[in-house]
Image (tube, grey):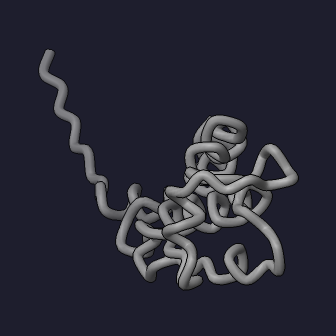
């Protein structure tokens, strides 16, 4: 017995539906979530450094434009809040990785 099957699908449409296509929704959501979650780890005095964060258009980079951002990121400065300090992206990821994954899953339809 002969059986034929024709499968007609568009990988591009599937990727787009999941936010992984040209719209880049999943990447942008990850960057937005990471930026928001990093706020409580960024050194804080007046809020200028924390508020200087900008996400690139493609969502692949979060840049802090305060003139002293590099010194705060790499330096050994004392901060009253032990959560705040250098390498704030790594601090955030260590504490909130599962929450970031959940945020991306919400966009992509993952489980």
Residue 82 in the image, given as x and y percentages of width and height:
81, 44
Q: Residue at x 67, y 60 (%)?
A: 33
On screen, residue 20 versus residue 31, left or right, reads left
Say which quadrant the C terminus sits in.
top right
Give the total of numbered labels: 0
Determine the residue positioned at 29% across, 55% down.
11
Q: Nearer the viewer, residue 77 or 59?
A: 77
Q: Is residue 77 above or below residue 28?
A: above
Task: Estimate the x, y position of residue 61 in percent, counting from the top left.
Answer: 44, 69
What x and y, as percent, mark residue 2?
Answer: 13, 22
Q: Above or below — where is 1 with respect to 108?
A: above
Q: Quadrant of the N terminus?
A: top left
Q: Is residue 90 left or right of residue 49?
A: left
Residue found 22% across the figure and 36% down from its top:
5
- Residue at point 49%, 69% (across, down): 70
Q: Residue furthest left?
A: 2
């Amino acid at each position: 017995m002969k059986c034929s099957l024709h499968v007609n699908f568009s990988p591009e449409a599937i990727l787009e539906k999941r936010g992984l296509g040209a719209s880049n929704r999943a990447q942008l959501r990850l960057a937005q979530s990471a930026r928001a979650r990093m706020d409580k780890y960024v050194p804080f005095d007046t809020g200028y450094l924390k508020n200087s964060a900008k996400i690139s258009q493609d969502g692949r980079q979060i840049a802090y434009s305060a003139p002293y951002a590099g010194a705060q990121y790499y330096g050994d400065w004392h901060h009253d809040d032990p959560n705040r300090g250098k390498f704030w992206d790594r601090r955030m990821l260590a504490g909130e990785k599962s929450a970031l994954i959940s945020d991306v899953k919400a966009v992509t339809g993952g489980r």
